[in-house]
Amino acid sequence: MTQPFFDDVIPRFGTHCSKWDMMEPLYGVPKEDGIAMWVADMDFRPPVCVQKAVEKMAAHGIYGYFGDDSDYRAAIGWWMKNRHGWDIEPNWIFTTHGLVNGTGLCVDTFTQPGDGVVLMTPVYHAFARVIKAAGREVVECELALNDGRYTLDFDAWDAQMTGRETMLVLCSPHNPGGRVWTRAELEGVAEFCKRHDLILVSDEIHHDLVMPGQTHTPMALINGISDRLVMMTATTKTFNIAGTHSGNVIIPDPALRARFAARMGALGISPNSFGLEMATAAYSPEGAAWVDALVEYLDGNRAIFDAALAAIPGLTSMPLEATYLAWVDFSGTGMSREEFTARVEKSARIAPNHGPTFGKGGETFLRFNLATPRSIVETACTRLTEAFSDLQ
């Protein structure tokens, strides 16, 4: 395959890019020399096979309704089997407008207004937004922080349950903490859901972006949970095609599948043809080789970023086992949230995600997106070192 050029700096200003074009209005970080490290998309072009799929559509020039998605479903099946050891059937797959939409559809289908939906916080902020907008209650079960890593605190969470909870949304691998949950931990999640009669929605959008030496286990491979399990996966994070707003809700259980199909039909939801074509191209041997090269590159960026932060007293970057999102704790500086955030945004001219948006436990953190050319990561490290130079 053609060697991916992850070092290429591709200007994104003026392209209706949320990450870069909204940086100054939302964060006050100047467009002229600011660094956008917030929205979780990458500053890399997708593999050539994906670009060629779009070019083929453009050359054809007719953009009608998509029919016969058998190749698309087969590509998903091939990827899950070959990359994750998970056998799925084509009829288990529903295509949604991304996984935030998929989460909303699950909440709509499997819960009622006023129900509690459990989140293990801090966690991806869109979950809480969707749950609240649907008139459900967000139940925050805070992750335990042990030796700088998040762990699951089932005893504390059992005590929190009131009986009003009907669903748990799991983020696996975890965003923003970068944890790859072990099989034993996932078995614990499954048992927790069975104890409290919860539908388990497992968002595994980062499952392909796992650092060397780590192994992701799909929740679908955990025994005894399939009758209450909804899996969510996507090409969008893996291949940097989030603008297609295409995701997959994969449901092994026939009864749950029938309920979800009925809700999809009632809402008239059907997929975007560009997303289907791009996903079909991505889930291929060429796409797989590109992902392998990507993960190696991201791991290099992680090492550079972690080394720089380790040299700044009071800053701790959580060990990154998966994703390209560094979760940095500033509590050791003794600074207020306002002060350390100002140093990052005003002095270093970097726009990160603010920790409190991820829920309980995020108050002293900022999240940094490392999926950008290495030269930009290195510049960010230099600026952070200078912004906190008085601590050294």
Image (tube, rainbow, N blue to C red):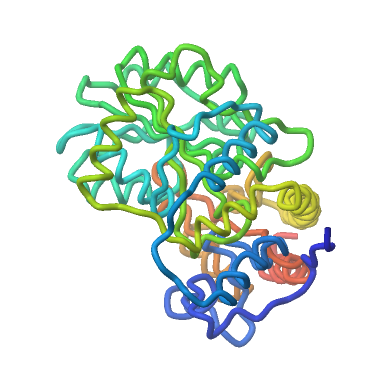
Q: Is residue 250 above or below residue 99?
A: above
The outermost residue toward the left is 113
Q: Position of residue 110 (x, y in %)?
A: 25, 32
Q: Quadrant of residue 47?
A: bottom right
Picture residue at 62% right of the left edge, 51% below the top: 238
Figure disc tally: 0
Q: Position of residue 344 (x, y in %)?
A: 59, 68
Q: Taking the image as drawn, is residue 310 in sight?
A: no
Q: Position of residue 153 (x, y in %)?
A: 47, 22
Picture residue at 33% right of the left edge, 25% below the top: 199
Q: Quadrant of the C terminus?
A: bottom right
Q: Is residue 112 above or below residue 273?
A: above
Q: Position of residue 102 (x, y in %)?
A: 37, 45
Q: Is residue 366 left or right of residue 158?
A: right
Q: Is residue 342 above or below residue 318?
A: below
Picture residue at 33% right of the left edge, 32% below the top: 118
- Using the image as rendered, state which of residue 104 and residue 76 is in the foreground: 76
Picture residue at 56% right of the left edge, 48% below the top: 331
Q: Quadrant of the N terminus?
A: bottom right
Q: Is residue 298 left or right of residue 135?
A: right
Q: Is residue 71 left or right of residue 310?
A: left
- Using the image as rendered, state which of residue 96 and residue 388 is in the foreground: 96
- Using the image as rendered, state which of residue 224 and residue 182 is in the foreground: 224
Q: Taking the image as drawn, is residue 332 in sight?
A: yes
